[in-house]
C-alpha cells in the first residue's frame, strides 16, 4: 500500500531529479579538480592486475581533455565512451527520474541499455586485441 508521501507530483519528481543530477555533477566536479590539479585519481584494477584495458579505461583522461576542448585527444583516450557520452548523460538522468518517480524502466530503454552494454564489452575486447597486434 502506498501513502500520499510515496506519490510525488510530476513537478516534485522533476525537482528531485534535477537535484540528484546536480549533486552527481558536483561530485564529478570535485573529482575533476582532484584529478586535474592534485594528480590523484582512481586506479583501474583491471589494468593494474591484468595489463589489459578495461572498457572504460581512459574515461577520466577523456573528460579532462574535453574540458580543455582537445577533442582529438579526448577521442583517443576512449573512443566508445566519447561517442556514447550523450547517451550516458541521458541514461543517468533517466535513472534518477525513474528512481524518484518510483517507476520501472521501459522495455525499449532496457533493450537499448543492453545493446550499449554489449557494445561496451565488445569495445573492451577489441581495444585489447588491437594493442596486441
Image: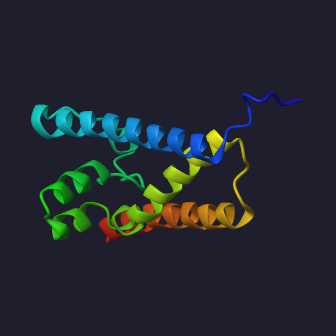
Name the residue rendered at 19%, 68% in the picture: 71
Residue 25's place in the image compared with 72, above or below, is above
- Residue 47 seen in this snapshot: yes
In the rendered image, residue 124, in percent from the top left (x then y), is placed at: 44, 61
Residue 115's place in the image compared with 6, above or below, is below
- The image's colouring method is rainbow
Say whether residue 2 is left or right of residue 70: right
Name the residue rendered at 14%, 63% in the picture: 69
**Which image quadrant: the C terminus?**
bottom left
Residue 103's place in the image compared with 108, above or below, is above
- Residue 43 seen in this snapshot: no
In the rendered image, residue 67, in percent from the top left (x then y), is placed at: 17, 55
Say whether residue 125 is left or right of residue 132: right
Name the residue rendered at 45%, 66% in the picture: 123
Name the residue rendered at 17%, 65% in the picture: 73
Kindly indicate the quadrant of the structure image that contains residue 70.
Answer: bottom left
In the rendered image, residue 102, in percent from the top left (x then y), is placed at: 71, 41
**Which image quadrant: the N terminus?**
top right
Say whether residue 11 is left or right of residue 132: right
> Of 74 and 91, which appears nearest the observer?
91
Kindly indicate the quadrant of the structure image that contains residue 39.
Answer: top left
In the rendered image, residue 6, in percent from the top left (x then y), is placed at: 74, 31
> Of 49 and 14, which appears nearest the observer?
14
Amino acid at each position: 500500500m502506498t501513502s500520499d508521501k510515496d506519490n510525488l507530483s510530476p513537478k516534485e519528481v522533476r525537482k528531485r531529479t534535477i537535484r540528484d543530477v546536480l549533486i552527481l555533477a558536483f561530485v564529478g566536479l570535485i573529482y575533476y579538480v582532484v584529478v586535474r590539479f592534485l594528480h590523484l585519481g582512481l586506479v583501474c584494477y583491471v589494468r593494474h592486475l591484468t595489463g589489459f584495458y578495461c572498457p572504460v579505461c581512459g574515461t577520466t583522461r577523456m573528460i579532462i581533455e574535453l574540458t580543455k576542448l582537445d577533442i582529438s585527444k579526448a577521442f583517443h583516450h576512449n573512443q566508445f565512451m566519447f561517442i556514447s557520452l550523450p547517451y550516458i548523460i541521458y541514461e543517468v538522468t533517466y535513472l534518477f527520474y525513474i528512481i524518484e518517480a518510483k517507476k520501472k524502466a521501459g522495455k525499449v530503454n532496457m533493450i537499448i541499455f543492453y545493446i550499449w552494454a554489449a557494445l561496451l564489452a565488445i569495445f573492451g575486447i577489441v581495444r585489447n586485441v588491437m594493442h596486441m597486434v
